[in-house]
Amino acid sequence: MTQPTAYGGRPPTPPPGAPAPELLVAKFRAHARRLFWSALVLVGVAGATAYFYDNLPAPFENWMLLAAGGLLVLLLVVIPYLVWVSRRYTITTRRVIARWGVLARHRQELPHARGYEIAQRRGPLQRLWGCGTLTLDNGVDAPLRLVNVPNAALVHEVLVDQVEVSQILAHRDGQAIPPMPPLPPPPPVA
């Protein structure tokens, strides 16, 4: 049997009845624009600490300055970075996976074959940075929100294509494949 052709630049589909491997389509994090203020705080704390070191008024000591700077960096730089780096989105040929959490890991999946509605929301700042928030809702499970997705329009297109291909494959594989007629018996050997 020949491989079915793919239209519109889509990947080739497997023959009917053959298992389709799950392939990675995209893996990404939220847009890094929310780390802008953390970067400014880090530069400001480093500059202020360097300026005031050995130049403090009488009741304060250098260790107090270093402790305050370290606390600010921990609260306003390290924790936001850990929160940002812990959230990851993965799109495969079968499902969408969202993972998040620093101490306790959470995971939410949504298969493409079930179909879902994709809502895209882009605020003014998100439009400026080219990102957006996608909400995937299949009407049964809790909606899956992909927050601050970079290049949201492209991700939206990819998700629509994956849902379409997955539903076509699920429908095609759900159809009964007619059994092959039995082979004729071999001719008698003379």
Image (cartoon, grey):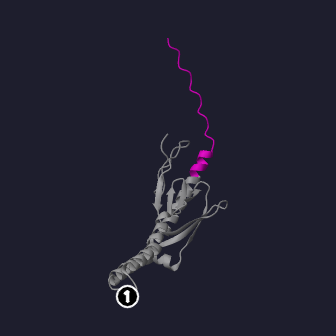
Residue 182: say if magenta.
yes
Percent x, y for residue 153? 50, 68
Q: Furthest-bottom residue in view?
A: 57
Magenta stretch prevailing secondary structure: loop
Magenta residues?
A: 168-190
Percent x, y for residue 154? 48, 66
Percent x, y for residue 19? 53, 43
Residue 47 appears in the picture as rendered = yes
Q: How many marks?
A: 1
**Disc 1: which residue:** 58
Q: Amino acid at mark 1?
A: Ala
Q: Residue at x 33, y 81 (%)?
A: 53
Percent x, y for residue 55? 33, 86
Front residue of 139/167: it is 139
- Against 173, is 76 above or below? below
Q: Residue at x 40, y 86 (%)?
A: 59
Mark 1: secondary structure:
loop
